Image (tube, rainbow, N blue to C red):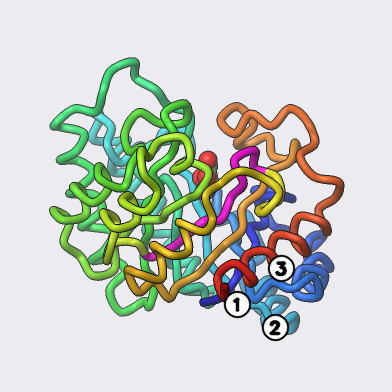
Amino acid sequence: MKIGFNLLLWTGTVTEEHFPLLADIKDWGADGVEVPIFDPKASPWDKLAREMDNAGLDRTVVSVLPKGANLIGEDKAERQAALDYLKACVDCTQRIGADVLAGPIYSPVGRLTGVPPTHAEREHCIEGLRALGQHAEGSGVTIAIEPLNRFETYFLNTMEQSAYILDKVKHPQVGVLYDTFHANIEEKNIYAAIQTGGKHIRHVHISANDRGTPGEDHVQYVETFAALRNIGYEGWLTIESFGSRLPELAAATCIWRPLAPSEEHVVREGVAFTRKSWNA
Ligand code: LER
Ligand code: MN
């Protein structure tokens, strides 16, 4: 098990100005960082990889679909744009030496159609993820789709819905991300949800119910860690917290007040709490 920290607390686009932060995050206790790739051309990836090596940080990637790209969209051009974008994200993920590409990569965050998912959308999702899995073969990158709460997506809200899709995708490099914040809203039973996700769970976001500091909230961490250990999960526990610095996701994450005394506090206390709870 490794504990990561998501750079989305600071930015959706990593630039050289964020490099000094990497040593701090290591110093504050994390084993790795989660790097946002919201535009495969936007960041100095090779330099960033060297900086993360120098800081002694392992890494994962989180991504969301940009405007005009939708893996489950009715429009073929939108589906192709999503697949092209996600293939480029897989390539970037490999390039920076990360082992996981995670996120709600099936549909844009915040996109709501006003109706439940359709059969056609599920079929597009299965087809698109299978093609992406094939593209990832030999890269060492695992793709983990992230169900979100109902206010951020209508398409995947639970482990059960995700497992249904993944049983059909049937690709060893395509699985699901379990995020404690979304599960706290959507799942009826935390332990059962993780059992249902089972072998499909390839990545985990540890996120407080208010998106502040894990351990200072009411997420059911004891049940979460017991269930993850029970399914034999050995992957990342990546802490995700949001502030108001993220225009890209502001409309979806809806953070309108400070949730922690400082960024250092979230990393130090969140990492210490997660490590202690996992080992308990
Ligand atoms: C968004 O709600 C989220 O949980 C992140 O992982 C980015 O999609
Ligand atoms: Mn998440």
User: Between marks 2 and 3, how big is the CA–CA gap?
Assistant: 18 Å
**Local SS, label 2:** loop
Identify which amino acid the numbered label 1 is placed on.
Answer: Asp
Residue under numbered circle 3: 272
Give whichever of 21, 137 is nearer the camera.
21
Give the image location of residue 120, x and y in percent.
15, 32
Residue drawn at the location 76% of the way across and 61% of the way down: 269
Q: Quadrant of the C terminus?
A: bottom right
User: Between marks 2 and 1, how big is the CA–CA gap?
Assistant: 7 Å
Identify which amino acid the numbered label 2 is placed on.
Answer: Gly
Label at residue 56: 2
Residue drawn at the location 62% of the way across and 46% of the way down: 208
Q: Earlier in the sequence, mark 2 or mark 3?
A: 2
Badge 3 residue CB within 8 Å of ligand 2: no
Give the image location of residue 41, x and y in percent.
57, 56
User: Between marks 1 and 3, how big is the CA–CA gap?
Assistant: 18 Å
Residue 117 colored in magenta in the image = no
Q: Which residues are magenta?
A: 202-211
Residue drawn at the location 28% of the way across and 18% of the way down: 115
- 110 relative to 36 in the view: left or right: left
Residue 209 colored in magenta in the image = yes
* Image vertical order of residue 29 relative to residue 125, above or below: below
Q: Residues within 10 Å of mark 1 (few under 14, many from 20)?
A: many
* Image vertical order of residue 102 relative to residue 261, above or below: below
